[in-house]
Image: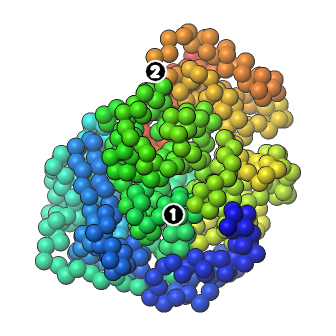
Amino acid sequence: MSYQEVYTRWKTDPEGFWMEAAQAIDWDQAPSKALTDKGDGLYEWFADAKVNTCWNAVDRHVEAGHGDRIAIIYDSPVTDTKTKISYAQLKDDVALLAGALQAQGVTKGDRVLIYMPMVAEAIIAMLACGRIGAIHSVVFGGFAANELAVRIDDAKPKAILAASCGIEGSRIIEYKPLLDGAIEAASHEPEFCAILQRTQHLAELTEGRDLDWHGFQVGVTPADCVPVEGNHPSYILYTSGTTGQPKGVIRHTAGQLVALNWTMEAIYNVKPGDVFWAASDVGWVVGHSYICYGPLIHGNTTVVFEGKPIGTPDAGTFWRVISEHKVTSFFTAPTALRAVKREDPKGALVADYDLDCLKQVYLAGERADPDTIHWAQDRLGVPVIDHWWQTETGWAIAANPLGIESLPIKVGSPAVPMPGYDVEILDDAGQPVSAGTLGAIAVKLPLPPGTLPTLWQAEARFKSAYLNTFEGYYETGDAGMMDEDGYLYIMARTDDVINVAGHRLSTGAMEEVLAAHPDVAECAVIGVADKLKGQMPLGFLVLNAGTDRPDADIIAEVVQSVRDQIGPVAAFKQAAVVGRLPKTRSGKILRGTMVSIADGSEWKMPATIDDPSVLDDIKGTLKTLGYAEA
């Protein structure tokens, strides 16, 4: 069946489409219908079902005779550790931890905050919560104490599961002082913390509150799976909000099971038993959907990787992991590939590994510039698929669904909307625009299963953030366009569309031109305030390793390229070469913060920033260029 036939089948009969997909899930009580319309733009999927996430991700594969299949491959170049965990072993480990949580009084509906690095125990912790109906909230390991405190006060966890430390390259990050500081700063106090002591750093436990991870599991009764309602929250995942108060995205249990299971074969083109690797972190949505839940629900082997694309030990790390563990589908962020490309521009390290196992590569998390896609395709010899989704949606809004049909790749586009998503491009008045016209990307309600039904204890904020701008639509916050063939182009966040003398221009389109220059490893374009034209674009360039040409020559060439390819209307006249771009730990460039610094506006150090010192360099560059220093 072709993509168009599948999409049309969904659009003609969405209820039937998702009820059919639901047959792949083991239900304690099957749903009587797919969708419940609660009114006022609120919807729930499979709400009257009874089901358990952990059963579907672990136990059922053991019951089906696949207990010896490897569930998790833990690969940590920073600790020189590799471990394989079978589905049978995973079941025992999860049931024991879940039993230990139960013995400490954790029950269905209680929140458990997880503050851990990329270790197998983080996945075990998530599954243990799902086993007993507890709602987990994973916070990226090493998050600052004040940001962790905000999340503790919002989720009000009964328990916190943490590790003694994380490892960033060669640097050990002590988690316990951050955790202690957060608990001290928070109004809410957990009843207990369980600490995984890593040999790289042993934490000092607080008597009366902190338990040893292994010690508190000794002698407990392993827990059975607890069936929960289909609309019971599986987890809370905090994403940054414009007010500085993070938004608690929730994911209902049944919708997540149905949607993620469907995507593994339809989008990622893997069969049960294949090895799937998402090179992300459990603290981000990709880690939830495609390190933990999606692959395990579908019966795949998932890779938990503790390392970096470069420096652990070199720019061939990705290829080593893929080759060694026979990865079929690989998922990473464009920024990771750009880091590899910058260190190894010719891709020489690819030749050191046998990558015959690799069938496809997926990119998401930010716009994938055509130059990076071409670089990867040329060196890997497999389709490199850009796809687009958000923390809020939990899975792809638009993709090239290789498991249904391999559509023509249009570099620069994440391809076409997936079943469940009726995507439209709207003008400021909420009216659809013609093909090729830039506008706000919105999705007609209802959103499909597996997406956010609301925010944690913040329904009014959910409506104001996502539903109120365009009646009957979910507002994505992204700007873009759709071509005549129905392919989407994500050009920028809505607030990254700049207004130059009345012309609405996409900074993303300019970045594509800059990234195509042979000496440019990565780049960013922001709109800075201008008294005459309202805003003017300003480019930042990071050059490839080994580039020895004068910066001024490269800047002149990219300025001319923007003029040639976008036109004088872009008014692109200024760029600067910098050593690095400020990014979040997940690889997103902090364009908004750069704009605030340039315009002299008030700004706050982002909680998710990877390296705060990079902003000092950006401030110095902006000052040299004559922009305000905040």
Residue 597: x percent and y percent?
A: 57, 31
Q: How is the image coloured?
A: rainbow
| Disc 2 secondary structure class | loop
Please tell me which of labels 1 and 2 falls first in the chain: 1
Q: Within the image, what quadrant is residue 212 found in? A: bottom left
Q: Is residue 289 visible?
A: no
Above or below for 381 versus 256: above
Vertical placement of residue 218 versus 544, above or below: below
Residue at 22% across, 48% down: 81
In this rendered view, identify the residue nearer to me: 137 or 345.
345
- Packing grade of label 2 (10 A; few <14, some 14-19, many >=20) is some
Task: Name the residue: 59% across, 56% down.
Answer: 402
Q: Residue at x 17, y 78 (%)?
A: 220
Q: Mark on residue 545?
A: 2
Question: Considering the image in quadrants, where does the N terminus appear?
Answer: bottom right
Say whether residue 175 is left or right of residue 575. Answer: left
Residue 394, x across and y down, in percent: 54, 62
Amino acid type at circle 1 is Met
Q: Which of label 1 and label 2 is nearer to you? A: 1
